[in-house]
Amino acid sequence: MVNILFVGVGGVGGYFGGLMARTFENDPYVNINFLTKQNHVEIIRDHGICVQTLSEGFTAMPARVSDNPTDLGVMDYIILCVKNYDLAEALGVLAPCIGDDTVIVPLLNGVDHHKDISVFFPNALVAEGCVNVIVRSISTGKITCNSDFADLHFGVQGMQDIRLKKLDLLFKQGGIYSKLTSNISTSIWQKFMLISTVATATCFYNKNFGQIRMDPSCLEGFGALVQEISCLASRKGILLPKDNKDKIWKVFRKMPACSTSSMHSDFLSLRNKTELESLTGYIVREGDKFQLALPTYNYMYSALSIV
């Protein structure tokens, strides 16, 4: 029996967890489990996860849903899909799910969460991971995917492991476009450079993707962010394709006009927690560390810090 646990059943966890739950719903050898908030458990347990993509809609039932890790027991794989600001709280309760051979894959926005996770669980195999997809949780257990791309990259830098290969196969069986790589740092930074620039720009200008693309001054600011984060990546020695900046622009131009970043959504909903520190503040602090001038990032971060 293989037990896989998705921690956090919002946009990312609900979408990828929903795909897996649909495939393995009646499988005697693979269980897909969800760990979610107490007030979400009964809804998902009774009605499942409903996913709507550009081409199809489906409802899937996980094997088990709980808000208590003790009820779920030791897992073979844990897929962390919480927001950055909820990571410490999630790690603080996960010990009952961690065994000697547990693999943890974080799918968070950011570049160094695996270090924090390894401190909590030094005996677990902690991978790095990222996803490229535009998904939203519109209500408990109801997920929409508004992009024609949806891929998942994961791995341990410079290392291969049979457990990771097995998970990659399970992801693929679940209908996920999965890529296992031992050069995961490049994938992480390619994703991070896109979401950091997009999140910072949408929040600073308070505009969605389409509105930014229609405003020359906003496009200029976005371009400055792309240039500055590219300079930082180069200074840090991150190996990226020569056309990486062009790829950021290409993806940004394809993003649905009426959609926005998840960080902007948090700002719009007046939540007291956002990903500002991990997506924008991190760049500012790394720039200071490397004595690298990043005037646009510094200006926008300072403005957003007092919102």
Image (cartoon, rainbow, N blue to C red):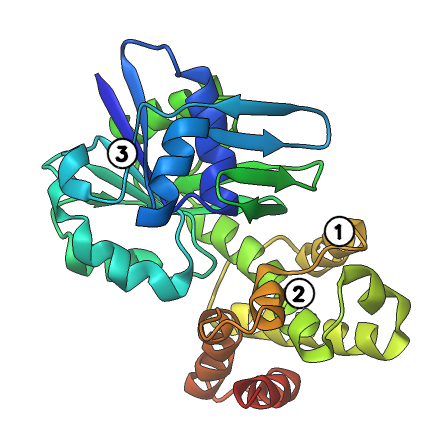
Compared to 243, does 139 lie above or below?
A: above
Q: Secondary structure at mark 1?
A: loop
Q: Residues within 10 Å of mark 3 (few under 14, many from 20)?
A: many
Work out whether residue 194 or residue 24 is closer to the camera in this orientation and state it.
24
Check whether the beta carbons of the residues at disc 2 and disc 1 lie within 8 A of each other: yes
The residue indicated by pointer 1 is 255
Work out whether residue 61 or residue 17 is closer to the camera in this orientation and state it.
61
Give the residue at x 63% y 90%: 299
The residue indicated by pointer 3 is 77
Q: Is residue 93 left or right of residue 154?
A: left
Compared to 208, does 158 lie above or below?
A: above
Give the residue at x 48% y 79%: 281
- The earlier-in-sequence mark between 1 and 3 is 3
Compared to 153, does 304 lie above or below?
A: below
- The earlier-in-sequence mark between 3 and 2 is 3
> Could you tell me how far apart the alpha carbons at marks 3 and 2 are, in whole angstroms?
31 Å
> Could you tell me how far apart the alpha carbons at marks 2 and 1 are, in whole angstroms?
10 Å
Quadrant of the rendered structure where residue 26 is? top left
Horizontal and vertical percent position of residue 28: 28, 9
Q: Amino acid at mark 1?
A: Met
Total number of numbered discs in the rendering: 3
Give the residue at x 44% y 33%: 17
Q: Is residue 37 among what the camera can see?
A: no
Q: Amino acid at mark 3?
A: Tyr
Check whether the beta carbons of the residues at disc 1 and disc 3 lie within 8 A of each other: no
> Could you tell me how far apart the alpha carbons at marks 1 and 3 are, in whole angstroms?
31 Å
Q: Secondary structure at mark 2?
A: helix
The residue indicated by pointer 2 is 198
Horizontal and vertical percent position of residue 129: 42, 46
Give the residue at x 70% y 61%: 245
Horizontal and vertical percent position of residue 91: 23, 55
